[in-house]
Amino acid sequence: MFEADAAGSLLIGGRPAADLVEEAGGTPLFAYDRSVVETKIARLRAALPAEVQLHYAIKANPFAPLLSHIAARVDGLDVASGGELAMALETGTDPGDISFAGPGKGDDELDAAIAAGVTLNLESEGEMERALGIAAERGRQVRAAVRINPPFDLKGSGMKMGGGAKPFGVDAERVPAMARRLVAAGADFRGYHVFAGSQNLRAEAITEAQAAGISLIAELVRETGVDAPEANIGGGFGLPYFPGETPLDLDRVGADLGRLLEGRGKELAGTRFTVELGRYIAGECGVYLTRVIDRKSSDGQVFLITDGGLHHQLAASGNFGTVIRRNYPLAKASAFAAPAEETVNVVGRLCTPLDKLGEKVELPRAEPGDLIAVFMAGAYGRTASPEAFLGHPPAREIFV
């Protein structure tokens, strides 16, 4: 995916990493390669059924230039806060193609969503009543779907979002009453949202969850007598971060989904289906570049201490939802194609033993001033990290 130039330096967006650092004004730096994003979206379009809408979940990476680029190439955006809603509207995306999920929407966020005309994925009866009340006060119509907490999860997911007691969505048995209430109140009822889990590399597990979700939505349509114009069946498509992981068989996922939709039945004949992805679209495009400040040894081990760390790239440190810490792929940027010469630990500058970017990794010899590249940094990087911890400067970002 990433290559080296004739001198062996890492290229990002066709340019040497060192040149990007100079242009951005220093390190640490998140560099995002637009060609990787374009390739990923094209690959999804080719694999998924043509009738399926592709949405981008902004939470994965909201960097404005990257977001605008993605927004122009997908069918809609999914947001989870008033701040993300403002970002989504700034891209020029049609409000009817924006959906707003999240279990703790404030009245101000509900008001903004109703005023903009985006779809609210309602996550409780209380939230529904607040939204209906705000709409009545403003003389507006609520555009709403119900987010379902399904009686199943996405097996093998990195993060389970459905099944059992969850803060997300409404237990399936309570959904019919909400759908009827919305219709009776004059809302623009858009259908349902089902998100069972994330970061899954098993095509059969994703297909199983999608089949269960489609079946559940069809059952709700039959029970309520209320059509579902739209059905967001979530995402869960995983990326291989670590050695030994097998990439998701996207072609199989797409073919299976096509068969499911062909046999979906008359209840859902007019339903538009959406797949919502964040990490899968943006994750591989990003590289986190951090400079070695010091090289030291301790008890026979070498430590490369960098000017970056978990305050910018929490996930790579192993402190973002992982049970067992494993190294994200990393490299010495100026010797990307060179063979390894030593085993080192790459750590950040924070006063905590949790600040690890690479533990006992094999690299060409690196000295102070060298750039270390941490890959898979396009999703859940800067905005998912405790940037203010210890008061170091924020990371820079560049889109190339």
Image: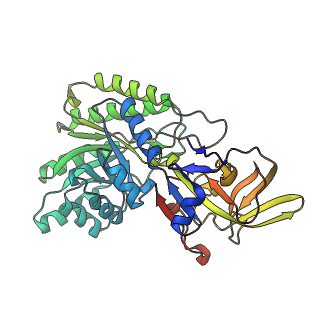
Residue 70 percent coordinates (x, y): 36, 49
Q: Return the residue nearer the eye: 395 or 332.
A: 332
Does residue 178 appear in the picture of this structure?
yes
Give the color scheme: rainbow, by chain, secondary structure or one colour. Answer: rainbow
| Residue 385, image quadrant | bottom right
Name the residue rendered at 51%, 66% in the picture: 24
Residue 172 percent coordinates (x, y): 34, 42
Does residue 211 appear in the picture of this structure?
no
Name the residue rendered at 64%, 45% in the picture: 6
Vertically, is 354 above or below 10? below
Counting every numbered tag in the picture gives: 0
Q: Return the residue nearer the eye: 119 or 149.
A: 119
Q: Return the residue nearer the eye: 90 or 213.
A: 90
Tell whether 327 sits left or right of 218: right
Tell whether 2 sits left or right of 352: left
Residue 58 percent coordinates (x, y): 39, 55
Residue 335 percent coordinates (x, y): 70, 50
Pick the quarter of the image with the N terminus.
Answer: top right
Q: Return the residue nearer the eye: 224 or 21.
A: 21
Vertically, is 329 above or below 252? below
